[in-house]
Image (cartoon, rainbow, N blue to C red):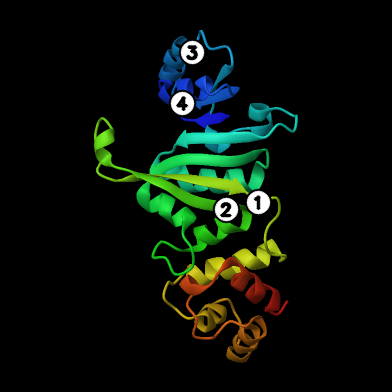
Amino acid sequence: MIEIGAGLGSLTLALDASGADVVAVELDPGLVSALADVLQEHPRVRVVRADAMRSDWDALLGSDDVPWILCANLPYNIATPLVLDVLARVPKVVRSVVMMQREVGERLAARPGDDAYGAVSVRVAYRALASTIRRVPPEVFWPRPKVESVVVRLDRLSAPPVDVDEDRLWRVVDGAFAQRRKTMRNALRRLGLEPAEADATLAASGVAASARPEELSLEDFARVASAMPA
């Protein structure tokens, strides 16, 4: 297992107790020193001072094919980019179980039609099956935060569920969600398609011109991307 932001080792000790080999990553030099003291009698834990957003994942996880699980309590500012980066670049991490601010976590696991559904939800669905395990109330923390948290589980898919050029797919997804509540016809026109081209693309993909991005699944977006003019 790899833990991001190990702090003073509360979660680290629990991971070690599970019998797993653990890499505990912490950036703060003061916490790294204290963490090393806490874990000095736990030889299966390797403490690494590193910035998870700039890490050499091969160096952290090794060169073999052993699968890894990422566990972390992620701060708001890195939760989404870290999860997306791990999904895109670190196939050795086959599962992530992460706690984060509720709004952020619900966005990762949202399905079409959910209030939290957006471009991030589609990017996650391309690489993983995501689910919200539980909400965590503010009163269990000290000091008490002003927000709720959630624990989200992401299980990596063996392959993306759609066969589509990624650049085209993300161009459509990002463009569609750039202005929420707008129709897909308007979204494609903002991407440079003429009205007739937008209508033909949507007709070929089986998506209504009046459909909203929030209603479309990953599969819907993939069909639109594939039907777009080159």
Give me the disc on residue 142.
Answer: none
Q: Which mark is residue 39?
A: 3
Left or right side of 213 for 166: right
Residue 219, position in %: x, y? 62, 69
Q: Amino acid at mark 3?
A: Leu
Local packing at callout 2 (Cα closer than 10 Å; few below 14, some 14-19, many 20+) is some
Q: Are marks 4 and 1 in contact (CB under 8 Å)?
A: no
Q: Which mark is residue 157?
A: 1
Q: CA distance from mark 4 to mark 1?
A: 27 Å
Q: Answer whether labels 1 and 3 touch (C-beta < 8 Å).
A: no
If you read the primary sequence from the N terminus, does the residue marked by circle 4 or circle 3 appear first?
4
Report helix, strand or loop for mark 4. Answer: loop
User: How far, Cα to Cα, is label 2 from label 4?
Assistant: 25 Å
Label 1 with label 2: CB-CB less than 8 Å: yes
Give the crowd class for mark 3: few <14, some 14-19, many >=20 residues within 10 Å.
Answer: some
Asked which quadrant contains residue 170, the reply is bottom right
What number of labels is visible?
A: 4
Front of the two marks 1 and 3:
1
The residue shown at (47%, 63%) is 118
What numbered label is drawn on residue 6?
4
C-alpha gap between disc 3 and disc 2? 33 Å
> Quick one: label 4 or label 1, which is nearer the N terminus?
4
Q: CA distance from mark 1 to mark 2?
A: 7 Å
* Amino acid type at mark 1: Leu
